[in-house]
Amino acid sequence: MAIAQPKDGNRGQGNRTQKGTKDKMACLNLTEEQQAQTKTFDTDMKAEMTPLKLDLKEKKVQLDKLMVADPTDEKKIYTLVDEISEMQAQMQKLKIENQLKTRAILDADQKVLFDANRTGKRKGKGRNGRNQADCRR
């Protein structure tokens, strides 16, 4: 029996990061101005992140090929591992920068909720045992 796959190619995984962020942001009761600012922050981050993600995928494919090549070129493998690590660090820094920008525009009550959701102080379990955003303090 064939199972229909979503047109976006995610096979039911959805965009977990975006959905999780939307859930967390909904708890904050942002003003329209704050919503516009966070949207700009997210758009800017995605613009920087997209080429990094593509390059990262490319490097991982290259690494996979080098790992099964005969003879194995350890120097090239370790060079790629270093490049992949650097790209992952850049991506993590972009995410953190986005979080810091967002946190900077929040009032004191919003920061409490934002920080609680960011650090994992959440109640309840969702699908697959993952914590879900909770709007309580």
Image (cartoon, rainbow, N blue to C red):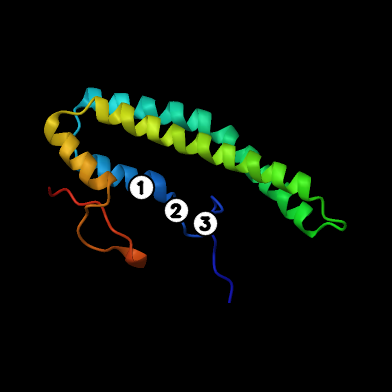
Q: Secondary structure at mark 1?
A: helix
Taking the spot 38% from the left edge, 27% from the top edge, the residue there is 41
Cβ atoms under marks 2 and 3 closer than 8 Å: no
**Disc 3 versus disc 1: distance between alpha carbons?**
17 Å
The tag earlier along the polypeptide, 3 or 1, is 3
Taking the spot 25% from the left edge, 25% from the top edge, the residue there is 104
Q: Where is residue 55 drawn, in percent x and y?
A: 64, 38
Say few, some or many: other residues with alpha carbon within 10 Å of mark 3 (under 14 / 14 to 19 / 20 or more): few
Say few, some or many: other residues with alpha carbon within 10 Å of mark 1 (under 14 / 14 to 19 / 20 or more): few
Asked whether, in this view, residue 67 is left or right of residue 52, the answer is: right
Asked whether, in this view, residue 11 is left or right of residue 135, the answer is: right
Q: Amino acid at mark 2?
A: Gly
Q: Residue 14 — which label?
A: 2
Q: Which residue is mark 3?
A: 6
**Disc 1 versus disc 2: distance between alpha carbons?**
8 Å
Q: Secondary structure at mark 2?
A: loop
Cβ atoms under marks 3 and 1 closer than 8 Å: no
Q: Nearer the viewer, mark 3 or mark 1?
A: 1
The tag earlier along the polypeptide, 2 or 3, is 3
Q: Where is residue 22 drawn, in percent x and y?
A: 31, 43
Hey, which quadrant is residue 68 in on the image? bottom right
Q: Residue 19 — which label?
A: 1
Cβ atoms under marks 1 and 2 closer than 8 Å: yes
- Residue that protrudes farthest toward the bottom in the picture: 1
The tag earlier along the polypeptide, 1 or 2, is 2
Taking the spot 52% from the left edge, 59% from the top edge, the residue there is 11
Quadrant location of the N terminus in the rendered image: bottom right
Q: Amino acid at mark 1?
A: Lys
Taking the spot 24% from the left edge, 46% from the top edge, the residue there is 117
- Above or below, 25 against 70 in this view is above
Q: Amino acid at mark 3?
A: Pro
